[in-house]
Amino acid sequence: MHIPIFFPQPTTTPPPQDSSSADSTYIRRFHAALPNTTTITTNKPTPLTPLPQLAQHLGLKAVFLKDESQRFGLPSFKILGASWGCFRAVCVALDVDYRTTSAGQLQTLIRESNKKQKIGVYTATEGNHGRAVAYMARLLGVEAHVFVPGYMHAHTKACIQEDGAEIHIVRGDYDLAVGHAAAAASASTMTNETRILVQDTAWQGYEQIPGWIVDGYSTLMAEIDEQLQQYSVKSPSIIVTPVGVGSLASAVARHCKSHDQTTKVVAVEPETGACLYKSLAAGESVTVTTAPSIMNGSCCGTLSSLAWDVLRHTVDASVAVSDYASHQAVRYLQTQGISAGPCGGSTLAALRCLAETKQDTIALDKDAVVILLSTEGARPYPEPVDASLTSTQH
């Protein structure tokens, strides 16, 4: 069976600087103070769960899973970036200093501003980013308009609407939804309205807010560093991260490669939307035609320009996995008491692919410590079939 894995040639380009480090104190403090959607009163770090049976089966020293199934009461890591991106963007719109303004103080300023100048945030999503933006918009007291592909699961749309967002259904894929959201955000002709695009992908001319979203993910990486110390691990040998448009993956790579670490970065995408895999193989950022996937949050046709600038120099392996492989990983994690959706399960699927492939670029041996990023909790999805079996029946 052919498993799409691409190993980029080693680069001589200097490691990227982690720009979030200058604001890390503000970001951690901001996240810690955010209200939680559950009865939990404090925003504790999400668990870093050891998987000793998996490590033993694969012949590794240790495997840990960063479980993002409950982040501030939402089932995904996305709130880390969306909250900081929304906060910074609205601070700019109201001309206030983010370093001396809390989310609560910003709420008060927004209430006063809305009497004269209504603020609205616009975004496109495959699911979790839109839900996070909707939650943050409701928290701050601004309108949210979320553009979604027509094929989005009804459960996901309902979750976004529950946070008060207005859903706009686009007859097309995620990339088309992004275009519609950007157009809508810039279309207002009313003098008493401010529209802000809060998108987690960047392109030429739109990079500041996506950059803030990436900075927001620094909290996740700082937590991992602190949690590994409990196991006397200075740094992991390998970290496996989903890609999507590349914002989280670039935060991961930037953190790992700018802290004198030797950590290998493995990126994973669905076979039906492997824009990083194809871009690395082509030597330039390319847009791919996508097809529906149960890993819909990672199924994107175009990389963020900011992410590509980082990932092309820092990714050590790019893996494209099938829906069935991700589904099997989700089922295994369930047996370990871990709630994971297909995007979260994809990192385990990628690790299994590497273990099954004869390669020596990513050392999977008795000294290897692996971190899997499980980026979302369990959610409904259509159960896929094993394509390798169906193909042999014809």
Image (cartoon, rainbow, N blue to C red):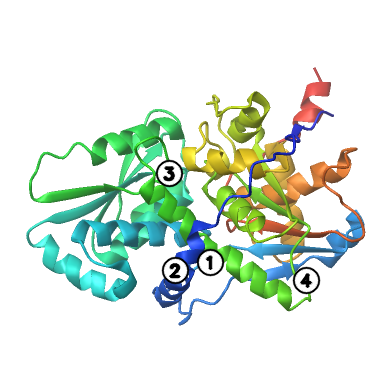
Cα separation, mark 4 vs mark 3, equals: 36 Å
- Disc nearer the start of the sequence (1/3): 3
Disc 4 vs disc 3: Cβ atoms closer than 8 Å?
no
Q: Check disc 4 and report its element: helix, strand or loop.
A: loop
Percent coordinates x, y for residue 43 in the rendering: 49, 76
What's the distance in space between the residues labelled 4 and 1, CA to CA?
19 Å
Q: CA distance from mark 3 to mark 2?
A: 23 Å
List the residue tagged with mark 2.
27
How many other residues sit within 10 Å of disc 4, few (<14), some (14-19) or many (≥20)?
few
Residue beneath the point at 65% across and 68% down: 224
Q: Residues within 10 Å of mark 2 (few under 14, many from 20)?
A: many
Mark 2 to mark 1: distance in Å? 7 Å
Specify whether residue 69 is in view: no
Residue 333 locus on image (x, y percent) = 73, 58
The numbered mark at residue 219 is 1
Does label 4 or label 3 sit earlier along the sequence? 3
Res. 233 mark: 4
Q: Which is more foreground, mark 1 or mark 3?
A: 1
What residue is pinned by disc 3?
125
Is the residue under label 1 in contact with that under label 2 (CB below 8 Å)?
yes
